[in-house]
Amino acid sequence: MEALKERILNDGYVLTEEILKVDSFLNHQIDSKLMYQMGEEFKRRFANKPVTKIVTIEASGIAIAALAALSFNVPVVFAKKTQSRNLDKDTYTYPVYSFTKKQTYDIHISKKYLNEDDDVLIIDDFLANGQAAAGLIELVKQARANLTGVGIVIEKGFQKGGEELRNNGIIVESLAIVDRMTGGEIRFL
Amino acid sequence: MEALKERILNDGYVLTEEILKVDSFLNHQIDSKLMYQMGEEFKRRFANKPVTKIVTIEASGIAIAALAALSFNVPVVFAKKTQSRNLDKDTYTYPVYSFTKKQTYDIHISKKYLNEDDDVLIIDDFLANGQAAAGLIELVKQARANLTGVGIVIEKGFQKGGEELRNNGIIVESLAIVDRMTGGEIRFL
């Protein structure tokens, strides 16, 4: 998606060869208009495919998922990373390791909001090693729901998450795939 | 806002006399269309008031803030509850106590995304004891930004947060104010 790639080139910042900071428009400050356009692009890419629910993970997946839901006209469910006092006890759950935060946490979705009648589109802001996506896919499996595909804003093509998902036959649509970030320069696939 | 009150009456669930569960449309599963309408309502209520930025707090404030931002046509910044490896070190920060999670955590906003030129509308899903709102207001003060007001989806009128903010001269617009929840029945102000 050209508008996104331009924005990444203009406002993204290569912190290390593995970390791309896009917190000026994607995951700390949020450009909702651009996210709405990204939602429309996901809708084009998954046109004619069944989607009854968008699933994401807190916190930085919520904005893009909630805006994409306008185009898909379906509810969003976001997996929680903590067992809050207010969350149902009856949840699908799976451990996820975060390379960013260097810790493992259980993600949860209430069984009320995902079931075998659902066709699920998973949406997230980043795909790198694929830990979060794999955890969400596991929750979809636990619910016996159908996984229609995975929509990603920025895929780090030099890490293994995208390849592993595609090797497992999962449809992954990434709006921008960063091929490499050597020398502070961002190159797209 | 009538559509919201109806939805609360239809789908909300009184867990205790203090806890209202609305996770079927507000803070676990998300109804984006309703949230877009709530954003439009916030825009009506803050019409002709200056707003250059919407500020909220992760995780459950993000969806309503990101959707309201479409109507205000301004960026959102969401305060983070953890010091992630990818977050700037140079942040506004303040400790917030969560009654839901029974713990205190520091909230952070990068100094890049809030400054003295900003007119801030704080948006959040709930206002109860007002701890989160007070923490966000403190970050706005640290940035020397102007606080235009606070927009809340559901205010618990029987807890002290809303009264304290209004007593301090802050404009608080709540789309639904729950007056009491005795006997499992939800009564609005």
Image: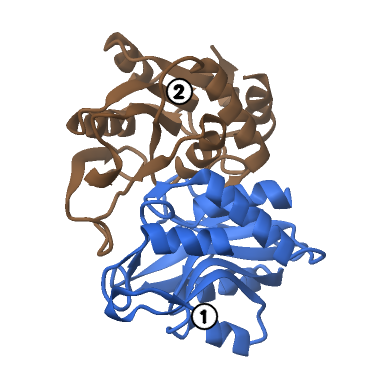
Chain colours: A brown, B blue
Q: Quadrant of residue A123?
A: top left
Q: Amino acid at mark 1?
A: Leu
Question: Is A175 left, or right, of A150 in this rendering?
Answer: right
Q: Chain of mark 1?
A: B
Query: Which residue matches tag 2?
Result: A156
Question: Is A4 left, or right, of A94 in this rendering?
Answer: right
Q: Give the image location of residue B125, x and y in percent.
A: 49, 62
The lab-note entry on whether marks 1 and 2 share a chain reads no
Name the quadrant of the N terminus of chain A: top right
For the point 74% across and 66% down, the residue is B116
Q: Chain of mark 2?
A: A
For the point 48% across and 37% down, the residue is A65
Name the secondary structure under disc 1.
loop
Q: Amino acid at mark 2?
A: Lys
Q: Give the image location of residue B187, x and y in percent.
A: 43, 77
Question: Is A158 left, or right, of A9 in this rendering?
Answer: left
Q: CA distance from mark 1 to mark 2?
A: 50 Å
For the point 31% across and 49% down, the residue is A80
Q: Nearer the viewer, residue A133 or B145?
A: A133
The label number, if any, that marks residue B189 in the structure image: 1
Question: Is A107 left, or right, of B66 in this rendering?
Answer: left
